[in-house]
Each structure stands twice: as structure tokens, then as C-alpha cells.
Image: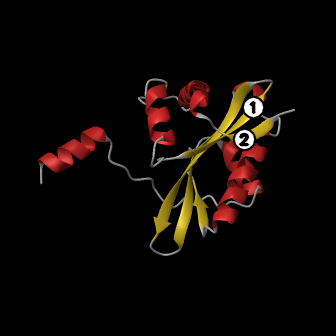
Amino acid sequence: MFTIRNAKKSDMSQVLTLIKELATFEKEPDAVEVTVEDLQKDGFGPHPAFHCFVAEVNSKIEGIALIYHRYSSWKGKILHLEDLIVSESMRGSGLGTALLDTVVKHGHDLGVKRINWEVIDWNENAIAFYEKKGARVLRDWDVVWLDETGINNYVANL
């Protein structure tokens, strides 16, 4: 049996462990720069940058859904699901569904017009899971981003 609840500041160490597990799964084991302190400061200060739901099994966090607010010039208020992570040992247990259900209900209660997230193109299990839930996977859009180095180079060339 598991419990889905709002994350607490004291959960961030276990949350970071799952974030690192996801990075390893996505073949980017050294890409995680965020620290427990960053997560605590950014998620639990006077103006939280994110909200996190956790799935707890026997007092251990085995899954997370990390979300934040966005705004669409076409739709209005939307919610971004940054990560939906279930520990490898708990995949197929219903935790992912319970976490996604919680995010969608939360978005509905907030009155958002859309919930966005990305999925890596080779993770066919995740894609099938999301499509089964009614999500549209837009394969004709590319993710565009500037990392810290790119931002610094951009500004230096202004």
C-alpha cells in the first residue's frame, strides 16, 4: 500500500535520490547539479518555484511528481509536470498512475487549461503509459533550451 502526499522540506534528500535515478536511467548520470539545499530553498521559501507530490511506501519515498505554474499566451494558466519519477523497483505497481492522477486533479482544481510535460523519445513504455491516459505526445515539436553556458554566451554577445 502507498500514500500520495505533498512533499515536505525534509523529504528533499529522498527526492534528490529519485532525480538522480532518473538521470541515470536517461543516460545522463552526471547532469544533476541541483542539491538538497537548492530543493529545500526553491520549493519551500516565501515564493516556491515548484510543488512536489511524493508517493510513500513503508515510510520510503518511491515516487515523485514535481510541478510548477506556467502561462500560455494561447490558453492561459497551465501546469508543467517537470518530472514524474517512480523508482525502478516500484514500476508497474500503480504509483505512476496515482501520481499522475494527483497532478491532473490538482490542475483541474486550479482551473488550468493544459498540463504540459516532456518525455524522452526512446522511452516507449512512458509514451504508451501517457497515451493510454489520454495525453497527446507531440512528436513534431522539438524542445528548445539555453543552458547556463548558453545564457552566459548569449548575454556576452548582446
Q: Which residue is mark 1?
A: 56
- Where is 71 relative to 123, above or below? below
Label drawn at residue 5: 2
Amino acid type, mark 2: Arg
Does the rendering let one see residue 133? yes
Q: Residue 26, located in which quarter of the rendered image?
A: top right
Cα distance in 3D space between marks 2 and 1: 8 Å
- Left of 18 or right of it: where is 47? left
Query: Would residue 102 be found to the left or right of residue 40 on screen?
Result: right
Colour mapping: secondary structure
At x 52%, y 28%, the residue is: 27
Residue at the farthest bottom position: 74
Image marks 2 and 1: residues in contact by CB distance under 8 Å: yes
Left/right placement of residue 56 relative to residue 31 reads right
Residue at the location (44% across, 73% down)?
A: 73
Type of the residue with mark 1: Glu
Residue 78: image quadrant is bottom right
Neighbor class of circle 1 (other Cα within 10 Å; few <14, some 14-19, many 20+) is some
Residue at 69 percent of width and 64 percent of height: 108
- Residue 50 at x, y = what percent? 52, 47
Q: Quadrant of residue 107?
A: bottom right
Question: In the image as oriented, which residue stretches furthest toward the front?
Answer: 46
